[in-house]
Image (cartoon, helix red, strand yellow):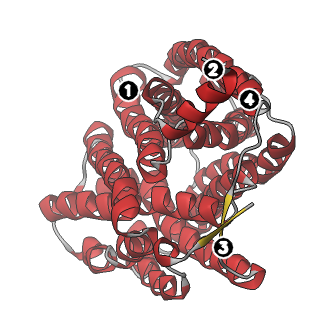
Amino acid sequence: MSQTTIIKNESLKTVYPILFSIAFAHLLNDLLQAIIPASYPILKENYNLSFTQIGLITFSYQLAASLLQPLVGFYTDKRPKPYSQLVGMSFSLIGMVALAFANSFPLLILSVVFVGIGSSIFHPEASRIAFLASGGKRGLAQSIFQLGGNAGTAIGPLLVAMIVVPNSQRYIVWFVLVAVVALVVLSKIAKWYKNHLILRTTKNTQISLPDLSKRKTYLSVAVLLVIIFSKFFYSASISSYFTFFLMDKFQLSIRDAQFHLFLYLAACAVGTLIGGPLGDKFGRKYVIWFSILGAAPFTLLLPFVDLFWTGVLSVVIGMIMSSAFPAILVYAQELLPKNLGMVSGLFYGFAFGMGGLGSALLGNLADHTSIEYVYQLCAFLPLIGMIAVFLPNLKKKKSRVV
């Protein structure tokens, strides 16, 4: 079989071993990220931190992750680096060690910045690998990829509750083992990616462009970024402060509050898996519209119900809102298919940036008002999803081939 035939067959078939491998690597990467907010109750107690300081920790981590991602994506669009993710995971490994042994607020900031840099290097190339391994099933591939990340985010708080909470901050060092496993998995993926890049150079590939003007394309990207703002600003209120909200309003222990956070994050993983395939079938615009605006009735109710219904509503909110991101990212990739790395880096970076900014601002607001007031205010954010009405329906648009 010739090299051209191989690359043609690979472009038509979904490469599930690679797709599930990169999803597993995403799980491990995001599990390490999740250690940071899951450790906040311990760090707050150990160092007598204010909510503003907790917000600054998140902001520092997210800023390191957000600013670099578009730059990494832009660079690797021109010069793909199959082994760059190993460098990124090495930064995260260093960050975990530093977080375990940090004994001051500045050292906490430095440790999370290392994890943020690792994440910024990982995501653009990992998202491109998922795209290349999709075999045309882009929504499904992105959902599987995102499912790995959300599963890692959900598992992180549980592991912190089991390993770190009963012991001490130093036990965070055990998560270095997660980074080591990720390095092994990523080295295998890098070999496939390198071979794939070599094979792609043996033939002229055609790229389908949407039949949209540049103005309409850029307007659509701007609309997607506004939707990302509403989604991740609200998500920041959950990931950083949901445990404090439950502990303050319902007097839960740290472990019980972490369990409720796990339920929310597990629901996010399920929603992520559903969102991509639904976008493939019905059109990504409708999934984006529903996943943001559809969560609004439940976010508006959340601050006013008892513990049982708080748990139920958080699961529903997580499932609905999380279905958006795979559809948003694939929609953006289809708008600018010649810039996969830059688009992935831009959207991941903007998502991290909004999460970090949201955490910092909401932490300061909580210090001056209350955690409960923060949730009452953030409840209105999903209403911004109405802006999705301005997105063109790419499923019905003809594409140009270049």
Q: Where residue 159 is drawn, which disc sits there? A: 1
x then y, percent, for residue 381: 46, 78
Which of the two discs, 1 and 3, labels the residue nearer the N terminus?
1
Query: Element at badge 3?
Result: helix
Q: Report how far apart the C-alphas of labels 1 and 2 lie in the structure.
A: 31 Å
x then y, percent, for residue 130: 55, 39
Q: How many C-alpha atoms fall within 10 Å of the one at disc 1: few (<14), some, or many (≥20)? A: some
Q: Report how far apart the C-alphas of labels 1 and 4 lie in the structure.
A: 37 Å
Q: Quadrant of the C terminus?
A: bottom right
The answer to whether residue 170 is above or below residue 347 is above
Q: Can see residue 193?
A: yes
Q: Residue placed at 52% from the left, 36% from the top?
A: 30
CB contact under 8 Å: marks 1 and 2: no
Q: Where residue 221 is drawn, which disc sits there? A: 3
Q: Which residue is mark 2?
A: 192
Q: Which residue is mark 4?
A: 197
